[in-house]
Image (cartoon, rainbow, N blue to C red):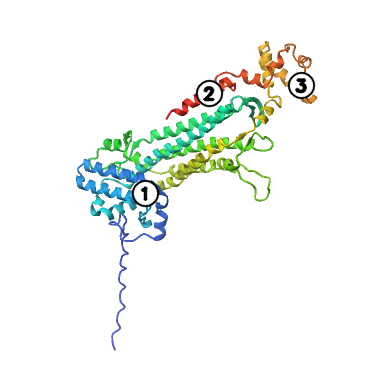
């Protein structure tokens, strides 16, 4: 009998092909799982960083040449290749490759395709960690300039409308109840000064981000003799980062921008809320232009302030973006972690949201119709000058708390009698205080109430004119 053959031993599985095109392919023997590759890719959103990535790469090539790492010919070949990449990106012909994960590797691989092996020298001494931090700081500089410009345009629109309404009274409100007369210009200028602080917060954020991270490497600094101070000057930074760990591992500049954006969104939301409320039939203080309103799909008579409502609503996005990045960063150990990739989408969303709001708000403000006749009537209603009556009694010698009590009884009496403050005769008023004299009527008009508040920051037309001049001065500053 033939001896039975022993079963063949299974051959060991051949390793899968290494991850072609990955910058770490030398260490790995197995390609990435397609789901994992899709999950970790950031090209879909970080591709917008390409102008700043190219600027940083050109400067890095020059720094490597100054350090003797590249020859002049190699530097020129790399810089020329990067300019060719720029031309493709500007023309929309750049061959994006999703498998290359992010914008940085897409540009690096395309550079290699265009100039050959010398392109592989560009990444000498550089990590994607300091490269990303650089791109973000350069992008932040541009975002601060753009959003600051949008805020200034909004201020200009508000100032123009304020200049038209220096003598237009309307009710001021506390607790959404009519309180005291003010002028419309005073109300509008309140937002101008809020937006001025928003501009200053953004500028402060830009100043603190004005530090070069390039040269920090992955976390420990580069091993090549890079003149980081010269590199900082070339890229327009005030200084080079003093600590490599900090340079690559923090995103406080992103968070600070998001915080400033959230505060700005809150201010813009409040302005939109005022206008939306004023446009109701119950107020009737303002009418939106047809160009910035919509109708109803069911009710033919409707005119809805959708643009203002969306400005109000988008503040929620800005808040959410801030909280998202704060939450991502709060527990990360030093130095870089891939969690930090999650900073970009909320940040870009906030930039885009702010720019969208600031693009539509100035023309909407310019197109508003203010119903100053209705505002003027409302300014004198509901005992709006009761405080002026109390002030009148104080000027006659009565302590303010007693004057407050007296006027409270006057208001109660008028309510019971179905009268306004202006309806009450001198004899009726003297029942509550013998200090009331014939000049009282002139002291409790809307115009008198406004004139009386001429202190700096007050609502008297002369004080508002001074505030208007100050606003124009602030807006002229960079």
* Residue 123 badge: none
For the residue carrying disc 3, how many other residues have a C-alpha within 10 Å: few (<14), some (14-19), or many (20+)?
A: few
Q: In this view of the protein, which residue sits in the foreground, 332 or 218?
A: 218
Helix, strand or loop under label 3 = loop
Drawn side of residue 194 relative to residue 332, left or right: right
Please give the name of the residue rendered at 38% of the width and 56% of the height, measured from the top-left corner: 98
- Eye-nearest disc, 3 or 1: 1
Q: Earlier in the sequence, mark 2 or mark 1?
A: 1
Q: Among all residues in the image, which is located at the extreme bottom?
A: 1
**Is the residue under label 1 in contact with that under label 3 (CB below 8 Å)?**
no
Q: Which residue is mark 3?
A: 423
Please give the name of the residue rendered at 68% of the width and 22% of the height, measured from the top-left corner: 385
Q: Which residue is mark 2?
A: 467
Helix, strand or loop under label 1 = helix
The relative height of residue 212 versus residue 96 in the rendered view (above or below) is: above
Q: Earlier in the sequence, mark 3 or mark 1?
A: 1
**At which x and y percent is residue 190?**
55, 28
* Residue 90 badge: 1
Q: In this view of the protein, which residue sits in the foreground, 61 or 256?
A: 61
- Eye-nearest disc, 2 or 1: 1
Drawn side of residue 157 relative to residue 436, left or right: left
Q: CA distance from mark 2 to mark 3?
A: 35 Å
């Amino acid at each position: 009998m033939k001896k039975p053959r022993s079963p063949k031993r299974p051959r060991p599985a051949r390793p899968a092909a290494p991850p072609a095109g990955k910058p770490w392919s030398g260490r790995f023997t197995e390609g990435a799982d397609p789901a994992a590759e899709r999950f970790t890719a950031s090209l879909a959103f970080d591709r917008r960083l390409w102008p700043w990535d190219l600027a940083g790469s050109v400067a890095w090539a020059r720094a490597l040449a100054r350090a003797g790492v590249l020859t002049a010919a190699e530097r020129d070949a790399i810089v020329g290749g990067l300019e060719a990449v720029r031309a493709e990106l500007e023309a929309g012909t750049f061959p994006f490759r999703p498998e290359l994960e992010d914008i940085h590797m897409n540009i690096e691989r395309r550079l290699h395709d265009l100039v050959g092996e010398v392109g592989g020298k560009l990444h000498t001494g550089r990590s994607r960690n300091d490269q990303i931090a650089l791109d973000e700081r350069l992008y932040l500089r541009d975002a601060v300039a753009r959003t600051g410009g949008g805020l200034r345009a909004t201020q200009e629109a508000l100032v123009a409308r304020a200049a038209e309404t220096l003598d237009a009274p309307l009710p001021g409100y506390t607790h959404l109840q009519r309180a005291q007369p003010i002028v419309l210009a005073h109300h509008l200028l309140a937002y101008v000064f809020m937006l001025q602080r928003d501009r200053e917060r953004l500028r402060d954020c830009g100043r603190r981000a004005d530090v070069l991270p390039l040269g920090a490497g992955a976390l420990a600094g580069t091993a090549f003799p890079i003149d980081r101070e010269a590199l900082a000057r070339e890229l327009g930074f005030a200084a080079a980062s003093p600590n490599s760990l900090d340079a690559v591992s923090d995103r406080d500049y992103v968070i600070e921008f998001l915080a400033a954006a959230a505060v700005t969104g809150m201010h813009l939301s409040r302005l939109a809320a005022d206008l939306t409320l004023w446009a109701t039939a119950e107020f009737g203080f303002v009418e939106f232009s047809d160009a910035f309103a919509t109708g109803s799909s069911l009710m033919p008579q409707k005119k809805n302030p959708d643009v203002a409502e969306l400005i109000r609503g988008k503040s929620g996005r800005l808040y959410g973006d801030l909280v998202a990045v704060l939450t991502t960063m709060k527990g990360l150990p030093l130095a870089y972690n891939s969690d930090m990739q999650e900073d970009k989408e909320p940040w870009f969303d906030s930039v885009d949201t702010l720019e969208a709001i600031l693009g539509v708000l100035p023309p909407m403000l310019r197109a508003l119709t203010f119903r100053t006749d209705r505002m003027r009537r409302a300014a004198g209603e509901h005992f709006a000058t009761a405080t002026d009556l109390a002030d009148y009694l104080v000027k006659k010698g009565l302590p303010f708390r007693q004057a407050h009590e007296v006027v409270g009884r006057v208001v109660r009496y008028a309510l019971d009698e179905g009268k306004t403050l202006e309806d009450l005769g001198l004899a009726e008023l003297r029942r509550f205080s013998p200090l009331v004299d014939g000049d009282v009527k002139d002291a409790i008009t809307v115009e008198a109430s406004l004139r009386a508040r001429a202190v700096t920051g007050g609502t008297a037309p002369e004080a508002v004119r001074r505030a208007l001049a100050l606003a124009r001065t602030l807006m002229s500053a960079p």
